[in-house]
């Protein structure tokens, strides 16, 4: 047995040792990844028939033209990552290769070839942070495969040797392949990158390539279990765009080449995840950016693949708005894939979804509700349960975002740039209760729209399920039991959030204190100006709009605001934001409920509030 084969077998998880493709499987000639030989004609015809897709095609070509004069990429590591270079490699090579295949213009071929030869000359692709290798390999594989027929023998050898030695083979080493057993985005990205590399150099190393593909088919099923049961992606909006997109790249390449997906698309929850992502965007265009997500949204090419699979163009309502927004999407390194996955769906045929509410259980359960898909001033609420122990999670169980009148009133900071923390020695990847991660300002419960009790952190071991919900349009609601997040501080904590009569938002917390006096702090993070207007009210104003925060509590509350500026030098600045809410001291053994009304109009008179157990619920 060859040493490379032995090393690969030893690196496999036990579940992956049964091949999915039989020994001796052959593949067609190049190009074989995503867009087969001769399919350019069909792609050009479909593009020319629709102005929206013609515009996208031209945008990709224009960006490719802009790349022609750029200097070659250099091996510049930022902190412990080469990932920025790897991602730019995908972007440049994917765009330029697409431009060459659809136009045949030599300038695009020559620039892509030069870029790949430069990357091939790197000493390595930084296997100590294997995402860097995975993305570099994927980009190089697409370029090598798509340009193969035009590349010289010398260029073929240089590029394919780099894909094999600096890409695929590095995944055989145990120190580099822990992601094979991971259930998060690393698995999806790394398996996609390695499979693309294997497909690119298949004829050179057919036995090794086949085993890499089979390893990936088996291993990628681990993170795909995280979509159970309804499609909610535990790592949130930003990492959905990462992990799921590469998962789709993986499946799409298999389908194109072998005519089947080996059962991956049918994995429970996977196709449903498109509805999760669509519902995560509010009327303002901002996503529900819990966990390590950025605070902006954008076009997701993978959503077109999902719409084609489900034959449901309404999944693309948000994507349609992005395409019609006039914004430039060409920083997206995977954008050319949208031309391969669009299924010739015309934007004019995309209608809004019929459901105004979406809920998903799983590791990080969520509920999103809105009063309209077409009204930019609609009310939108996204709330979550879950646990700080989930990969990339924050201490934000029970937190929510809220919009009305085109303003996001209740917001989430989302992530802080990893290198900005790591470069200052902050250890952000520990998830134990005493980990330094929870000292980072943006990551703990003190600055999320949830409860803080006795000034303590939420419990990492806690987990908050969504216990009930209702899609009734006059009382959309979801409740989550956050009790276990406050172990030792509260005997009971259940939060319900409702959109009432499509007019306002109600947040109800039912709590029970232990045998000691307890201080409960209720916070809302906002980009608005805040004015305390009474013993139980505050007024938020922004962009000429206003929102009244009104508290109905059984004991006196102290309305407050808190600064969002940290005194630690490693914390990001949070200009233009403030925390508001209140504190309430409750006696030993207290049992009661706190109602907070978020009122877009001052003339709204909130209805009487029932106990959470009496809230109507869907089955």
Image (cartoon, grey):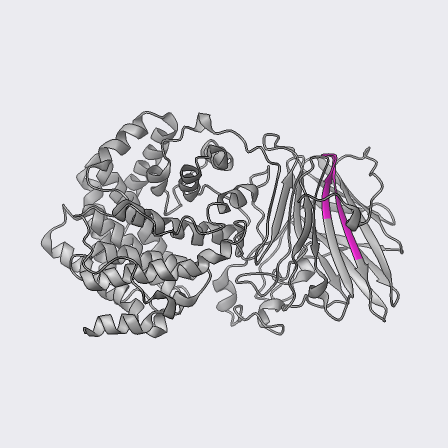
- Residue 308 placement, left or right of 592: left
Which quadrant would the C terminus be assigned to in this image?
top right
- Residue 38 placement, left or right of 321: left
Q: Where is residue 201 in the image (x, y as percent from the top left)?
A: 20, 57
For the residue pair 296 and 18, the one nearer the viewer reads as 18
Residue at coordinates 67% horizontally, 61% vertically from top-left? 445
**SS assignment for the magenta stretch, majority:** strand
Which quadrant would the N terminus be assigned to in this image?
bottom left
Q: Does the magenta stretch include residue 501?
A: yes
Report the magenta residues as a range.
497-510
For the question of whether residue 106 can be seen, the reply is yes
Q: Where is residue 539 in the image (x, y as percent from the top left)?
A: 78, 43
Q: Where 35 falls versus 580 (above or below)?
A: above
**Count of numbered circles on the image:** 0
Q: Quadrant of residue 207?
A: bottom left
Q: Where 102 falls versus 464 (above or below)?
A: above
Residue at coordinates 51% horizontally, 59% vertically from top-left? 417
């Amino acid at each position: 047995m060859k040493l490379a084969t032995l090393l690969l077998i030893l690196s496999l998880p036990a579940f992956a040792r049964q091949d999915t493709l039989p020994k001796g499987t052959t593949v067609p000639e190049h190009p074989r990844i995503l867009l087969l030989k001769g399919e350019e004609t069909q792609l050009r015809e479909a593009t020319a028939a629709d102005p929206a897709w013609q515009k996208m095609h031209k945008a990709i070509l224009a960006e490719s033209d802009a790349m022609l004069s750029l200097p070659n990429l250099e091996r510049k590591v930022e902190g412990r990552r080469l990932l920025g270079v790897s991602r730019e490699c995908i972007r440049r090579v994917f765009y330029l290769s697409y431009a060459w295949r659809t136009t045949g213009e030599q300038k695009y071929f020559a620039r892509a070839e030069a870029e790949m030869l430069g990357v091939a000359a790197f000493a390595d692709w930084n296997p100590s942070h294997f995402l860097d290798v995975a993305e570099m390999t994927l980009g190089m594989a697409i370029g090598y495969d798509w340009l193969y027929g035009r590349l010289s023998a010398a260029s073929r050898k240089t590029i394919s040797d780099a894909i094999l030695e600096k890409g695929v083979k590095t995944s055989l080493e145990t120190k580099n392949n822990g992601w094979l057993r991971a259930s998060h985005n690393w698995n999806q990205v790394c398996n996609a990158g390695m499979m693309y590399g294997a497909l690119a150099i298949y004829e050179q190393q057919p036995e090794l390539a086949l085993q890499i593909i089979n390893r990936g088919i088996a291993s990628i099923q681990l993170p795909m279990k995280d979509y159970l049961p309804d499609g909610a992606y535990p790592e949130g909006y930003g990492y959905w765009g990462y992990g799921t997109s590469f998962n789709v790249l993986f499946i799409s390449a298999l389908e194109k080449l072998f005519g089947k997906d080996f059962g991956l698309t049918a994995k429970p929850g996977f196709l449903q995840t498109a509805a999760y992502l669509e519902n995560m965007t509010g009327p303002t265009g901002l996503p529900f950016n819990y966990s390590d997500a950025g605070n902006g949204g954008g076009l997701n090419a993978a959503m077109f693949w999902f719409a084609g699979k489900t034959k449901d163009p309404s999944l693309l309502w948000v994507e349609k708005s992005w395409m019609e927004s006039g914004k430039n999407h060409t920083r997206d390194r995977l954008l050319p894939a949208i031309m391969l996955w669009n299924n010739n769906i015309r934007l004019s045929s995309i209608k809004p979804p019929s459901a105004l509410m979406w809920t998903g259980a799983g590791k990080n359960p969520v509920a999103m509700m809105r009063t309209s898909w077409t009204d930019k001033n609609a009310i939108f609420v996204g709330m979550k349960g879950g646990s700080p122990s989930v990969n990339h999670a924050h201490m934000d169980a029970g937190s929510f975002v809220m919009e009305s009148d085109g303003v996001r009133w209740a917001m989430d900071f989302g992530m802080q740039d990893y290198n900005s923390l790591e470069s200052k020695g902050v250890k952000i990847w520990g998830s134990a209760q005493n980990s330094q991660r929870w000292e980072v300002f943006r990551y703990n419960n003190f600055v999320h729209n949830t409860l803080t009790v006795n000034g303590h952190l939420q419990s990492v071991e806690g987990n908050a399920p969504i216990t009930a919900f209702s899609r009734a349009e006059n009382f959309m609601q979801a409740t989550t039991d956050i009790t276990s997040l406050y172990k030792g501080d509260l005997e009971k904590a259940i939060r319900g959030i409702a959109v009432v009569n499509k007019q306002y938002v109600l947040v109800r917390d039912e709590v029970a204190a232990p045998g000691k006096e307890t201080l409960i702090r209720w916070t809302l993070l906002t980009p608005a100006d805040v004015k305390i207007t009474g013993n139980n009210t505050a007024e938020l104003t922004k962009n000429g709009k206003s929102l009244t925060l009104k508290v109905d509590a059984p004991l006196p509350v102290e309305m407050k605001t808190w600064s969002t500026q940290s005194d630690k030098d490693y914390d990001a600045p949070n200009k233009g934001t403030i925390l508001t809410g209140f504190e309430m001291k409750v006696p030993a053994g207290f049992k009661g409920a706190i109602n907070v009304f978020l009122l877009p109009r001052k003339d709204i008179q909130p209805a009487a509030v029932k106990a959470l157990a009496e809230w109507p619920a869907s089955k």
